[in-house]
Image (cartoon, helix red, strand yellow):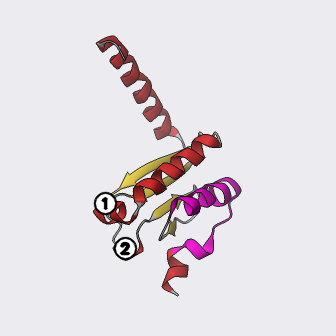
Amino acid sequence: MKSIKDLEEIRKRTLDTINLRKDQSGIRIVVGMATCGIAAGARPVLLSIMEEIEKNGLSDVIVAQTGCIGLCKLEPIVEVYKPGEEKVTYVKMNPSKAKRIINEHVMKGKIIQEYTVGAEEK
């Protein structure tokens, strides 16, 4: 970036991307990034998710961050929202589990039950 014009061009491209995402009905992945999540390792989980999405060229997946989800002892938490399906909440995540979620749940539709909040409560 060398000038205000360059900055404005970056801003325009970013806004165009954001506006396109609003119209999409694709998959949304939400990572808990409150203090509890960050302390438990949410940042490497988020980065792993984003890297795996980029590596696989998934353009219909939106990654978002949120504050406290309310299950601090189960952090890092990742929620996956797929159109027409119930939300899936994954708990005690790490970067390798996050990659598996992208490859199996997001790409192939297979929920990884042993990582879910339901499996943790048993």
Residue 43: give x, y in percent of width and height: 41, 54
Q: Which residue is mark 1?
A: 34
Residue ranking furthest to the right? 108
* Vertical placement of residue 121 versus 53, above or below: below
For residue 74, which quarter of the picture? bottom left
Residue 24: give x, y in percent of width and height: 54, 41
* Residue at figure coordinates x 55%, y 80% from the top left: 119
Near mark 1 (Cα within 10 A), the count class, few <14, some 14-19 or many ≥20, is some
For residue 37, which quarter of the picture? bottom left
Circle 2 SS class: loop
Question: Of 70 and 27, which appears nearest the observer?
Answer: 70
Residue 58 showing in the rendered view? no
Is residue 114 covered in magenta? yes
Residue 37 showing in the rendered view? yes
* Residue at figure coordinates x 58%, y 60% from the top left: 96
**What amino acid type is highlighted by mark number 1?**
Ala
Give the left or right position of residue 76, taking residue 25 as reference.
Answer: left
Start and end of the magenta stretch? 94-116
**What amino acid type is highlighted by mark number 2?**
Leu
Residue 2: give x, y in percent of width and height: 34, 13
Q: Examine the residues drawn in magenta and state their main secondary structure.
A: helix
Q: Earlier in the sequence, mark 2 or mark 1?
A: 1
Is residue 45 covered in magenta? no
Question: Of 65 and 52, which appears nearest the observer?
Answer: 52
Circle 1 SS class: loop
Q: Which disc, if any, is residue 71? A: 2
